[in-house]
């Protein structure tokens, strides 16, 4: 059936559009990237925010496909992206860690692919394999009015003050997980919600981050 479907709707790489593969060898290189710290480039500051690369080109296309393409099973790709993110240096000695995914909008919760939890599972699996104690706590949600897509940076920040909500207790040490950091407003709101429930955010990891409009001195390997 899969082969027949490929004849009707040919498969293209989610990143670059190359034919006959869901993800080509070159675009699969993202799974081998080393995370780097982008905290200094976010408009809303939060320490220890690490990503695999900038949100542009093939990686942007890949993230959008994983989020929205109903023909794609995002799970195996998100697990591998989680494995890569788990190699962020500040996580190497983290223990007794609660991994908390950022909440999806209600629109994506109803109609899109699940991103946060599979990504968190990939991170947890890698860290557990290193002998670290981790757990996943899916305790954050966005009220209906707090949808962020298409908002300006200022609009995101203002709307999120009404914000992300946390249900239940969280672990004492928390790692936030999201797909993309644009301004940092969502991560900051997540951190605020977690801290109001007694958690301490040790950092955050995202697949990609918005590239700063003005490049400043940087030691990341992807600038």
Image: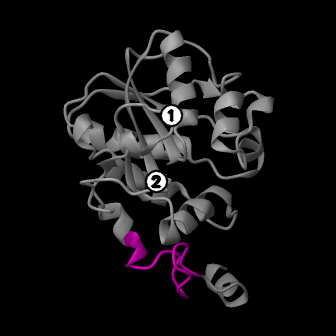
- The residue indicated by pointer 1 is 44
Q: Is residue 100 visible?
A: yes
Q: Which residues are magenta?
A: 12-28
Q: Residue at x 67, y 24 (%)?
A: 163
Quadrant of the rendering where the N terminus is positioned: bottom right
Is disc 1 placed on a helix, strand or loop? loop
Q: Quadrant of residue 26?
A: bottom left
Q: Is residue 79 left or right of residue 134?
A: right
Residue identified by numbered label 2 = 212
Residue 214: percent from left, percent from top: 44, 56
Q: Main secondary structure of the magenta part?
A: loop
Where, by quadrant of the figure, is residue 129 drawn?
Answer: top left
Q: Is residue 32 left or right of residue 139?
A: left
Nearer-N-terminus badge (2/1):
1
Residue 99 image position (x, y, % from top left): 42, 30
Quadrant location, the C terminus: bottom left
Q: Residues within 10 Å of mark 1 (few under 14, many from 20)?
A: some
Q: Residue at x 42, y 74 (%)?
A: 27
At 54% from the left edge and 64% from the top edge, which residue is drawn? 60
Relative depth, front residue between 181 and 28: 181
On the image, the x and y values in percent for residue 177 come to 47, 38
| Element under disc 2 | loop
- Most foreground residue, 36 or 85: 36
């Amino acid at each position: 059936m899969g082969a027949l479907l490929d004849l009707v709707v040919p498969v293209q790489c989610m990143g670059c559009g190359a034919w006959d593969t869901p993800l080509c060898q070159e675009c699969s290189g993202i799974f081998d990237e080393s995370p780097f710290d982008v905290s200094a480039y976010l408009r809303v500051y939060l320490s220890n925010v690490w990503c695999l690369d900038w949100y542009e080109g093939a990686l942007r296309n890949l993230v959008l496909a994983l989020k929205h393409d109903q023909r794609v099973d995002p799970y195996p790709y998100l697990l591998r992206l989680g494995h890569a993110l788990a190699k962020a240096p500040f996580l190497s000695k983290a223990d007794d860690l609660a991994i908390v995914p950022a909440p999806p909008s209600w629109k994506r919760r109803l109609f899109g692919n699940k991103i946060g939890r599979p990504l968190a599972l990939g991170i947890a699996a890698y860290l557990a394999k290193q002998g670290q104690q981790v757990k996943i706590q899916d305790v954050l949600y966005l009220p209906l009015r707090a949808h962020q897509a298409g908002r300006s940076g200022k609009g995101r920040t203002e709307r999120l003050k009404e914000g992300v909500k946390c249900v239940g207790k969280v672990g004492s040490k928390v790692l936030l997980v999201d797909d993309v950091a644009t301004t940092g407003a969502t991560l900051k709101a997540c951190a605020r919600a977690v801290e109001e429930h007694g958690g301490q955010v040790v950092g955050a990891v995202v697949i990609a981050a918005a590239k700063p409009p003005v490049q400043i001195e940087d030691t990341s390997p992807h600038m």
